[in-house]
Image (cartoon, rainbow, N blue to C red):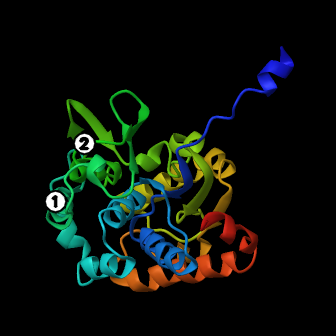
Amino acid sequence: MVKERENLPVKVRPYRVGLVLSGGGAKGFAHVGVLKAFEELGIRPDIISGTSAGAVIAVLYADGYSPDEILDLFSGLSFNDLAEITLPRAGFFKIDRFKQFLQQSLRAENIEDLAIPVVVTATDLDHGRYEVWRSGAIAERVTASCSIPIIFPPVLIDGTHYVDGGVLRNLPVYPIRNECDTIVGINVSPLVNKKYKQSVIDIAMRSYSFMSKSNTVEDMKLCDVFIPMKEVTRYAVFDIHALRDIANVGYQRTMKIFTGKYASRINELNK
């Protein structure tokens, strides 16, 4: 019986290279730098899994935007262009402007229409579980994936309330692990000790960072190539004005690690 099992054909995975992009607010622009480095190294992901900021960059890239075009898209924007302060009830800021921005910017309307397969993850607030979307309207699902609790209100989709995917799985490797030969994971939300204000928003953001840090541990272990972006910790979650500097951090870190620790993996990734 053992020999018979050993002779069974190995299941062929549908994707060769899977890229996983973590959440991290404006620090997610480091993902743009990663993609720029990938293009120069000849690496093209066959599927991308992202949450929060990682989902934003994933859908824009899969929609045909180049890394430079993604930066141009956000250049000149401020936090107030994408969010609107409101009387606190379910959140301090409305996120409608961000959803409208996505709807106006994206060429594809649904996730399944993107040129590169994308998985968008969020947290189902009503049932206490993470949600994985491979189809459906992009803008509302990515908005849900970015809705940091307390800062933004939950997003209602088909009768269920959703919040930021980083609450339960900030590095969504698990949803695509068994579909890919090689997984490259990028984490732009490493937790470091830094000063914070005794304000509701700062305390909420720091608490959220604890959650996202703790829930990435198991997914980090599932990566074949893991790139932590410790250098981005000097930027704040909403530092949109620093997007080009943050992207450069991602680019430099990726180029360095693929000419160093992971130099031997380049040929494997760009076959």
Q: Amino acid at mark 2?
A: Gly
Classify residue 65 by image quadrant: bottom left
Q: Is residue 5 above or below residue 145?
A: above
Residue 71 placement (x, y as % from top left): 33, 80
Q: Residue at x 25, y 77 (%)?
A: 73
Residue flagged by tag 1: what amino acid is it? Answer: Gln
- Percent coordinates x, y for residue 270 in the rendering: 60, 68
Residue 136 got which mark? 2
Mark 2: secondary structure: loop
Image quadrant assignment for residue 190:
bottom right
Q: Which residue is mark 1?
A: 103
Q: Quadrant of the N terminus?
A: top right
Left or right, residue 221 beside residue 53: right
Report the residue at 52% width, 44% height from top: 14
Under circle 1, the secondary element is helix
Residue drawn at 59 percent across, 62 percent down: 191
